[in-house]
Image (cartoon, grey):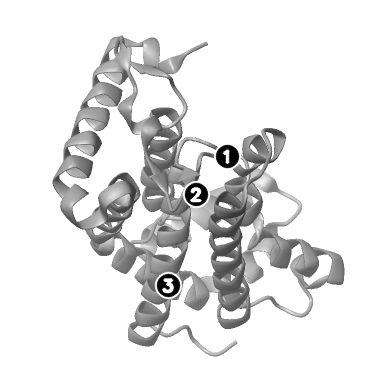
């Protein structure tokens, strides 16, 4: 089922296509053949800048959750055998503290939507019945509409291999820095303290690099910019809203 066949989403996709194509044409004197790639980077920066207030709220919520963690563990120990009672008490705790257990979901939802649109824009040969001109653009010889998997299947040339190598190395380095700097505060007696669970949590940081292999290069560029932005923003906000000592 094609969700973009739904009229409102068709209009959204066509509007996004027209806007990105116009921005690419505007940047052509500067970016030349990489103007579409530069347009993707600018769109990513604009999206992340618009989400800064949400990021601040997310940092405050993270600080509050860390402060509430001992009380949440007490509730789990007290009502662990009664899941309904535990849920009620947990929600009541968040309500009393004027917090939401779902805080921070909005940035993920917005970014997932943007990646989905970019993925579609650089995947379809036609948009709203006309040829997709974005597919003619590349970054230093690497087609923006091709994923690494498809590029390998079609014969990987040197420029494409180099661009993808840089993309994956940057995502992996940022993921490793994020893993080291933002280690979760896990209680020694909790289930997440088990070596296997810690290993799984550490591996989750690198899922973006795995995901990037399967999406068009344009969407992978979005991931490069957004994970780098996220690291810098989290570092700045963590200094502004430090977590309480474990």
**Dividing the picture into quarters, in which one does residue 196 lie?**
bottom right
Write down the residue under mark 3.
64
Residue drawn at x 56%, y 82% is: 181
Secondary element under disc 2, as helix, strand or loop, is helix
Pointer 1 local density, CA inside 10 Å: few below 14, some 14–19, many at least 20: many
Near-viewer residue (7 or 32): 32
**Dividing the picture into quarters, in which one does residue 129 lie?**
top left
Of the image marks 2 and 3, the number of the one nearer the N terminus: 3
Q: Would residue 175 be visible to someone looking at this image?
A: yes
Q: Are marks 1 and 2 in contact (CB under 8 Å)?
A: yes
Of labels 2 and 3, the one closer to you: 2
Quarter of the picture holding the C terminus: bottom right
Q: CA distance from mark 2 to mark 3?
A: 33 Å
Residue drawn at x 30%, y 53% is: 38
Of labels 1 and 2, the one closer to you: 1
Query: Is 222 above or below relative to 225?
Result: above
Of labels 3 and 1, the one closer to you: 1
On residue 147, the disc is 1
Of the image marks 1 and 2, the number of the one nearer the N terminus: 1
Q: Are marks 3 and 1 in contact (CB under 8 Å)?
A: no
Write down the residue under mark 2.
220
- x then y, percent, for residue 185: 62, 78
Left or right placement of residue 95 versus residue 25 in this view: right
Near-viewer residue (218 or 7): 218
Q: CA distance from mark 1 to mark 2?
A: 8 Å
Residue drawn at x 26%, y 24% is: 12
């Amino acid at each position: 089922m094609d969700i973009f066949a739904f009229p409102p989403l068709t209009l959204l996709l066509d509007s996004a296509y027209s806007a990105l194509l116009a921005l690419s044409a505007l940047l052509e004197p500067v970016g030349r053949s990489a103007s579409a790639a530069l347009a993707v980077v600018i769109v990513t920066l604009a999206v992340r800048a618009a989400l800064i207030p949400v990021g601040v709220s997310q940092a405050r919520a993270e600080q509050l959750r860390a402060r509430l963690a001992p009380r949440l563990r007490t509730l789990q120990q007290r009502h662990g055998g009664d899941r309904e009672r535990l849920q009620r008490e947990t929600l009541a705790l968040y309500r009393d503290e004027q917090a939401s257990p779902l805080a921070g979901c909005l940035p993920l939802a917005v970014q997932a939507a943007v990646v989905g649109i970019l993925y579609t824009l650089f995947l379809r040969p036609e948009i709203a019945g006309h040829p997709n001109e974005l597919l003619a653009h590349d970054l230093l010889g690497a087609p923006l509409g091709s994923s690494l998997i498809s590029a390998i299947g079609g014969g990987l040339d040197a420029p494409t291999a180099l661009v993808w190598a840089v993309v994956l190395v940057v995502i992996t380095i940022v993921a490793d820095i994020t893993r080291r700097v933002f280690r979760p505060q896990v209680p020694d007696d909790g289930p997440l303290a088990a070596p296997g669970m810690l290993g799984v949590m550490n591996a989750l940081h690198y899922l973006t690099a795995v995901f990037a292999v399967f999406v068009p290069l344009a969407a992978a560029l979005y991931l490069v910019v957004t994970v780098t932005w996220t690291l810098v923003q989290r570092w700045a906000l963590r200094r502004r809203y430090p977590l309480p000592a474990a």
